[in-house]
Amino acid sequence: MRARQGRAVIESVSAMQVQRAAAGWASRALFVAVWLAAVASQAAEPAVWPTQGWPTSSPEEQGMASAALAELVDFGAANDMDSMLVVRHGRVVLDATYAPFRPGMKHTVNSVTKGVVGTLAGIALKEGKLDRLDAPVLDFFSGRSVANADAHKKAMTIEHLLDSTSGLSWREPLSNEPPETALQMERSADWIGFVLDRPMAQAPGLSFNYDSGGWHLVSAIVGRQTGSDALEYARQKLFAPLGITDVIWRRDPQGIPIGGFGLYMQPRDMAKIGYLYLRGGEWAGQQLLPPDWVPKLLQARVDMRIGPFRYANGWWTLPDKRAYMAVGFLRQLIIVLPEIDTVAVVTGRKHYPFSELIDRIVDAARSPAPLAADALGSARLAERIADAGVEKRSPTAPTPGLASAISGKTYRFAANPVGLRSLKLDLTPGHARYDSTFASATPSAPPRRFEGPLGLDGLFRVREPQGSEPPLAAKGNWLGDSAFQIVVRSLPEGIVSSYRLTFNGQRVDVAFDDNRGVRARFQGQADD
């Protein structure tokens, strides 16, 4: 049986020392010292390195309670998760997938991408590809003519970008408000130029301001300094050592991997990123990150101005929970809990409080040593995981006579915020389908076509990937004699869209909303 000296240091020492001293954030130094001692103590132990795949274990063998993890799975179902993974002592103790999302699928990680790009910057620093983090950002773009290049902008450094304290004028609030400037960047033909030309709102380093544009500059700098780009560098220096092979990374119009979002990964590979940090930046005997890189997260000082959160290198720190996380929109999370030697990964479709999730994970970790076997708890956990993988049927209403009248008709739409251009429904029971076209993101490109099966029995039907288009799950239901609702889920992206169609003769009124907060109302007309 694996020796547990390191585990005891992580948990029992923190229980006796850190928790007493951690009444305030003044205990950071002690917390870091204890954590580093725990990492050092594990050096003599046979380490678990999941390069070729994660070993699995019963929760009790790793000191976790199956019954508590079963409740955690239910918490995930109640909060619209797509997947949940918990790793303790280097072994997977919980792996749940919520249907219709499926095991083996990649999921967008949204702003978790920032944590990965920050990791690449750390690797480049250790390798000498980046000389120093206080280097002025504009020095890396000397061939460009940069607007608004005042003294504040010239003082902006890589470290400011990594801490989201660039001082650039940028509106991307961590709230339900639209990410105004990020959307403008996406619509621009030259993302790097757009970011560099932004005026300065204040001197760099003064305060935190969430900024995907600054992170795009970091991606470009990493590519420039390593002679490739962020994706190729990651493949060589991060993904390959960790055994990560299945990723997609979106690029800007110039082909630069997007620095603030755009990465798609499997949950088990996301956990490897967290495990690298849990092990202090080491992987299989190789120190990938500078020795002080991970401790900076534990001592993060940049106030995010949302509760107790602090920020460093693309990671969020919760001092009172002694946790740090890579965080993406709609709760794509890599959570690192050093004191209990645990990494948790979730992907999902809505926001919920971080604290309850973390508390539930910590509560499940009952001991640094194995617990007695719990047959009832294990059975309950297995049942909840199996249940999560089975889609739940939503209510359906009787089919009105209007269904046959609209089936097969093509409805066309003028320009609208959603981009829907045409829609045709075949509502034949057992063979229902949709066929739609949407305006392309670029005016010169042809419309994008989405067609596939449509569930009418309260269950989604999945259209498998078509070229670069993701797998889509769709179902429909009558809301009355003239109103039909279509719900569409982009499975890798966690985006859930609802189209309420109200038919009135040849006209159809569309009420659209999605889980990103987008709302739109528009009309269409039948061809005949």
Image: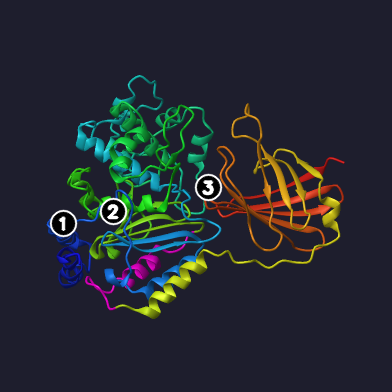
Q: Give the range drawn in magenta.
A: 351-372
Task: Assign a secondary structure to mark 3.
Answer: loop
Residue 36's tag is 1
- Mark whose residue sits in front, 2 or 1: 2
Instruction: Report how far apart the C-alphas of labels 2 and 3 lie in the structure.
Output: 33 Å
Residues 232 and 483: in front is 232
Residue 45's tag is none
Residue 200 falls in image quadrant: top left
Q: How crowded is mark 2: few (under 14 residues within 10 Å), some or many (20 or more)?
A: many
In the rendered image, residue 80 lying in the magenta stretch gets the answer no
Return the residue at label 2: 275
Residue 40 visible? The answer is yes
Q: How crowded is mark 1: few (under 14 residues within 10 Å), some or many (20 or more)?
A: some
Return the residue at label 3: 178
In the image, 528: left or right of 498?
right
Instruction: Report how far apart the C-alphas of labels 2 and 1 lie in the structure.
Output: 15 Å
Task: Assign a secondary structure to mark 1.
Answer: helix
User: x and y percent of residue 508 in the render?
Assistant: 79, 49
